[in-house]
Image (cartoon, rainbow, N blue to C red):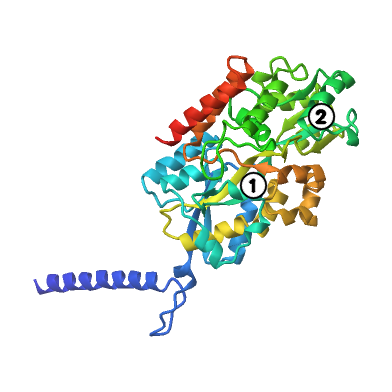
Amino acid sequence: MKKSKKAKLLAVFATLSLALAACSSDQTSTKEKPAGDKTKTATEQKVKIVYARGKDVTKGTEKVVEAFEATHPNIDIEFREMPSDTGKQHDAYITAFNAKSSEIDVIDMDVIWPAEFAQAGYVLPLDRFIQQDGIDLNEYNQGALGAAQFNGKQWALPKFVDAGLLYYRKDLVKEDEVPKTWDELLAKAKDKKGQGNTKFGYVFQSKQYEGLVCNAVEFVASYGGAFIDKNGNVAVNSPEAIKGLKKLVEIAKSDVVPGNVTTFTEIESDQAFIEGQTVFLRNWPYEYASANDKEKSKIVGQVGVAPLPAGDKGSAAALGGWMAGINKYSKHPKEAWEFLKFMAGAEGQKIDAIYGGHAPTITKLYQDQETLKANPTFADKGFVDGLSAAVSRPVAPNYPEISEIIQINISKAIAGEQTVEQAAQNMEKEMKAALNK
């Protein structure tokens, strides 16, 4: 009996020894600290930040993360790939944020999301971080910066920019013939149509979808109008906005565009240009590379780029692109800001421009030789001037609803189902109702 008790006691002592050894092993997995030393070890200080964005087919994101981690050894970045479809990506964020999830810290946002996310309380305002670190917002493309402002606060920083540009056939259009106004474009398109085996004088996106809104914003802004002004007031039913919309409808109904132009998105527009079917084209910055792709384009080396034509108030280009913000529920907002600041700052944007091919929102990078070597298009004055004319689409917390109102009414005006004046009145009424819900 005594022997049995002794064996049991030995077993208990052995178990306790193993447990203590295990605890000791956990506690000393980093270097032992002297007694009384309360300094945290490198391992204990490390913070993981989860960064979410859509699929990146380039090495841009990878290189930015590598560079950040090299200079911030106590912050690890986990890249979370979201759906490449922006609608599905948007919905995934909404689901997570409605559940107050802190799983994601930093997110990429389409330029039309900040107001919605700010209104819903999904993202943190960045103003105090910007002020504390002395970030010079004047270095940024102001159109891109403005797209992330809502109720007087800055909710995101722009990472890269897209803007509508005018492309033309350099073999058909001399440099001094590039149209400076919409009226000149219409005249030149009529004059040049048919030359060089072209079928059309001008092609743009006028199908009933988001691309039509982008084109409409460009026409309206170039004549000094707006759909929604900077104070959030519906302004579409104004002489300036109506004049811009009338010019859009006039061109869409003219014989310089394809007869089925109301079916054209970016895909059909690009195809018409690279196949040599049109003299002039309105499209995004990627078009330059597409039209110079020897494997698919018939007009390689004959591609000119310029700012979009001007109305009474100058040239305007619809803003596209992406920006970064911080999840309101992040448990590490300070570290999240450090990553966002780097990624959307000059160093991060330069890396992304070189390895990702994206157009920076920090304007001084268009004079950076390494950036220009990787992207010769960025040195083109017409390209840079076009980006400088960027204006945001209507800033509204329920943007998708506002966009649909614009699409439907402008499409009806192009189809002749209502006048431009009637379209403007209907948009005013419907937008006010939507914003006052």
Give the farthest residue toward the front: 239
> Mark 1 = which residue?
143
SS for callout 1: helix
How many numbered discs sit on the rendered protein? 2
Give the residue type that dot 2 points to: Glu
Residue 353: percent from the left, percent from the top? Answer: 70, 50
In front of the other: label 1 or label 2? 2
Residue appearing at x 38%, y 69% in the figure: 26
Q: Write the residue at 59% across / 66% down.
A: 134
In the image, residue 16 above or below residue 278 = below
What is the quadrant of residue 237 in the picture? top right
Judge left or right: residue 389 versus residue 376: left
From the viewer's perspective, is residue 337 above or below residue 419? below
Residue to which mark 2 is pinned? 184
Q: Nearer the viewer, residue 286 or 50?
A: 286
Mark 2 crowdedness (10 Å alpha carbons): few <14, some 14-19, many ≥20: some
Query: Quadrant of residue 377 in the image?
Result: top right
The quarter of the displayed image where residue 316 is located? top right
Q: Quadrant of the N terminus?
A: bottom left
Q: Earlier in the sequence, mark 1 or mark 2?
A: 1
Real-space CA distance between mark 1 and mark 2, rounded to the nearest whole angstrom: 26 Å
Question: Could you tell me which residue is drawn at 25 percent across and 69 percent down?
Answer: 15
Say if residue 276 shows up in the picture. Answer: no
